[in-house]
Image (tube, rainbow, N blue to C red):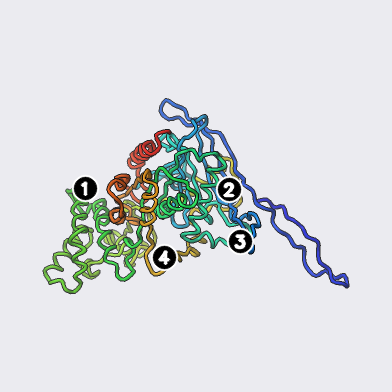
Amino acid sequence: MSDETETRPRDRTAEGADTSAQTTRPAAPEDDLVPSQHTLKVGRKTLHYTATTGRVVLHEEVYADGVYQGRRAKAQVGLTAYTLDGAPTGRPVTFAFNGGPGSASCFVHLGLFGPRRVAMGDVGALTPPPYAVVDNPETLLTVSDLVLIDPVSTGYSRSVEGEKPDPYLSFKGDIDSVGEVIRYWTSENDRWGSPKLIAGESYGTTRAVGLAEHLQSRYGMYLNGLILISSVLDFGTLDFEVHRNDRAHALYLPHYAAAAHYHGKHEGRSLQDVLAEAEEYAARDYPWVLSRGNRLTADERAEAVSTVARLSGLTPDYVDRANLRIEHWRYYGELLRDQRLTVGRLDARFTGHAASAIAERMDADPAMDALVGPYATAYNHYVRTELGYRNPLPYDVSSEVAHKAWKFKEFEAKPIYVLDLLERAMRQNPHLRVHVAYGYYDGATPYFAAEDALAHLQLPDELRANIEHAYYEAGHMTYVHEASRLQQSKDLAAFVTGCAPTG
């Protein structure tokens, strides 16, 4: 933002006394995008591309008593766009972001989509700081231009000086502002004629679905595809606390079984065999058991306790004392308690030393601990030294401002739910295709809960056929697991090409 100010004369009384200090007003902010040229070797080919990074200014149209007063700057939103040099007109473009709400886009940016990625290692072989940034020949740039977006209060994105961020820290405010970034970039870069996709991770999938309906209804911007990584479209599938939600307890069980299998609790069995049993029990018998309450007979309860304990890797005594209802924050502290280890929530493959061996819940997520440092360090280095963008603000990877101030006023007294928006978007635009990616070890948005939500979409068969599913032996950030990253990159390239064959 410019430091220039506009100055107004001081007011004086009749006696000539100075009545006020000098009044200043910040100059209107302007886009500060910085372009740079790069190359990337992909097999025998060399890609020449332009990276453009910085902040764009969002404006609102102002009316007073029904009279149009013009446009007023309201926020500065950070983004990085990658466009292939010399590409044909109509090349696809994918807009991507992370979730939170309050997370910056550096994770999908430097983990999966971008032409450069962070090299951090994986479980059992994490690299020490500082962390290298290396070429990513599997980048989605091979088939689509990319625009990585940091919503307001994340990354370098902020409300303009003198304004509160609150209007953007809500479900609708967030969608309106990110939607305006997409519309603005599309118009400024003459890309209305390009196939367009939106990719989100975690809460970013909630945002992506809301954006699909919003962009189509508000601007007539019809999309070709949605990429939903570690999705959450019905928060009722995750919420253990509201009205003792037995649905969530059942839907988490297959994830618990996956975590238990990874940590040696199902010796001699394959992961798929364990998941098949857990899914069948979670879909049929477990909901019935929980619905019976104290009407269960002693034999029925004993059988249920034994089954849940065996699948989850916990002791029968713990499952019995938990009344057959395992809460996930407690689970990650309990599974390896005998080893004084905590299991990761974002990725159950990770473990860390527990601060207290008798704590009821995990004190910190070892998966998050492993991820934040590499991605924050790599992005701060990359944006300055390679992309040439320098901003004195801290790059806010996980925004405390957003976490504290975020409101879901649109969903008061009910779970956050966007399946109806996805149904509307797909009915409105029957060409819209959806790719859903699941990680078995993801405890933030467990795969079986996401499956269940999508199974309840009220769509005709021909539209349900537009949804495809991909599964990985990975966690919430599927791409941290190298084999999954390689396979997921192939899957996404195939999906984009199928959505937008002109690419």
* Residue 243 percent location from the top left of the image: 31, 71
Q: CB atoms at circles 4 and 2 under 8 Å apart?
A: no
Q: CB atoms at circles 1 and 3 under 8 Å apart?
A: no
Which element type, helix, strand or loop, lies under badge 4? helix
Query: For this rendering, which residue is in front, 431 or 268?
Result: 431
Residue to which mark 3 is pinned: 163
As drawn, the label of residue 411 is: 4
Which element type, helix, strand or loop, lies under badge 3? loop
> Could you give the CA–CA distance between mark 2 and mark 1, rounded to whole angstroms?
45 Å
> Could you give the CA–CA distance between mark 4 and mark 2, rounded to whole angstroms?
31 Å
**Quadrant in which the C terminus is drawn:** top left
* Residue 229 percent location from the top left of the image: 37, 49
* Residue 501 percent location from the top left of the image: 39, 34
Q: Earlier in the sequence, mark 3 or mark 2?
A: 2
Question: Hey, what amino acid is under mark 4?
Answer: Phe
What residue sits 53% from the left and 49% below the top? Answer: 181
Question: Hey, what amino acid is under mark 2?
Answer: Arg
Q: Earlier in the sequence, mark 4 or mark 3?
A: 3
